[in-house]
Image: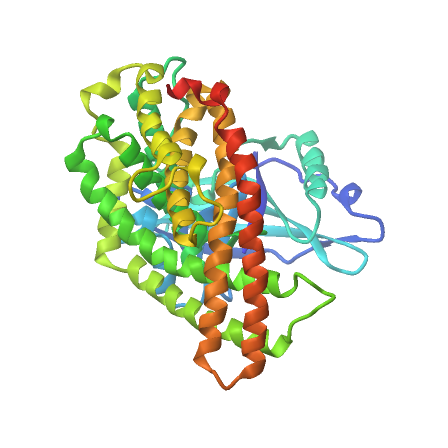
Amino acid sequence: MLEEERKYEVGQEFLLPDLSDAVPAGGRLVELPPVTLTATYLDTADLRLARAGVSLRHRRGDALPWTVKLPADSPGVRHEISRKGRPKAPPADLVALVTAYSRGVELTPAAVVQTVRRAYELRDDAGRVLVELADDAVSVLDGKRIRTTFREIEVERKLGERELLDRVESILTAAGAQAGGFTPKHVRALGAAAEGEPELVAPGELPAEPSAGDVVVAAIRRSTGRLLGHDPLVRLRAPVGDDDTAVHQMRVGCRRLRSDLRTFGPLVRKSWTRPLRDELKWLAGVLGQARDAEVLRARLSRTAAADPVSPLDPAAVARIDQVLATRHEAALAAVDEALGSARYLALVEALVDAARTPQLTGRAGRPATEVLPRLVARPWHRLTDGDDEVDGAADLDPAAPDERWHAVRINGKRARYAVDAVAGVLGGEAAKLARALAKVQDLLGEHQDAAIAAQTWLSIAELERSDHVTAVTAGRLFERERASVHAARAAFPAAWDRAARKRRTAWLR
């Protein structure tokens, strides 16, 4: 689940103001009995979790005493996952959730924090908790000795709107509370060492006149962060948006990084990139099986509902989905096995090292504007011109087999990734080309998904030839998918013409 909260620093003498003005009409403010919470935080010896904004703790007295908290996309928002378990035996699945941060290093007690909490609930007229405010008196323990103390206010959003958090904040700050950065209790308890740079280096800002190496390093760090950042969400089977999944995002991280290492090959040492690309290919392949199953299940639902006037047999659709669900579970089990392997741990270590100290060649020190267009031109020309095995996008036959369209899609993806990597630096027409290529890829992706789905529906019907209702349903699904294939082919020339305009691609020549 996602936890959204704000923290405020206050002195020991701070008087909590009256919060009644923040309570919605008809609601009430409820004061809860004080409680004492003792939490033991686990970390590596060099505090890898704390430095990454991650925590694994046991808190005595909670119904679910073990909790992992992971960073999310917004400040003050975290993924919170809790489990039962004995005090000295953290649940294996929670330990696995922090693998991308701990990299398999032993986790031991790093801090013990005791909190005397006085909590208040802002409820609506139906008694639902909208916001909870906790006034915490915190003691950092060293055995039985109190090493230091501090006080803070936490305001956590429950069922209320974010505007209610704003109203509570205005009351607190007017009374003298200091709103500031989001610093967890255990990080304050651990001190400066816990506030150091994380192991995984972020892309950071590029200089005003970046070298080619600066751009490549930023691309490596961006994709590595995307890949490892979605590791725990893949393990949790967590969605990352209305129409997206963690498996998809982790796979994209693999494929973008692998593509960038290929495109910018002259700027990085081959002896370093070759094994990394091989391992990324392995991981992307494992994730790909699960992703394909996700796409097919979502597509089945969408295609089956495409024509409400002519509905398909719901029982037959459900039977097809059950086959896909079984395949999906098997693919996810394979992902779990891969993420729990020594091979994956070694890859995580290599990725963190790649982001920290990428091995560049001497050519990487030259200006980005001088070097990068030539390197991006290679995947671009392969997309436009093709070769003996793959058609060029400009010459793609509308009646060509699906496989030829898919081959162009692969080249298009590589070209798009390459242009994306440099668009932020080169700007102008490069940025416009990146956007145009994204639309081309959307069409080619729709074409491939529809073509694969069409064959899948028929193959599932083949499993039970005596089930005529399912066979008819599969046939109708097939025809709808082929209509999508033809629609994508019809729309492709216009999308390609917009991408391939001379003024948009002149920088590549």
**Quadrant of the rendered structure where residue 226 is?**
top left
Quarter of the image with the N terminus is bottom right
**Residue at the bottom extreme, as displayed:** 466
The tally of labels here is 0
Residue 116 in the image: x percent, y percent? 53, 51
Residue 472 in the image: x percent, y percent? 58, 76
Q: Is 483 left or right of 286, judged from the image as shown?
A: right
**Residue at the right extreme, as displayed:** 26
Colour scheme in use: rainbow
Q: Residue at x 48, y 57 (%)?
A: 451
Residue 209 in the image: x percent, y percent? 37, 13
Q: Residue at x 34, y 26 (%)?
A: 377
Q: Residue at x 72, y 40 (%)?
A: 163
Q: Residue at x 66, y 61 (%)?
A: 306
Q: Is 187 left or right of 124, judged from the image as shown?
A: left
Residue 381 drawn above or below residue 275: above
**Quadrant of the rendered structure where residue 126 is?**
bottom right
User: Nearest the camera: 372 or 486?
Assistant: 486
Quarter of the image with the C terminus is top left
**Residue at the left extreme, as displayed:** 271
Q: Is 52 left or right of 116, judged from the image as shown?
A: left
User: Nearest the camera: 185 or 477?
Assistant: 477
Residue 456 in the image: x percent, y percent? 46, 66
Q: Is 277 left or right of 271, judged from the image as shown?
A: right
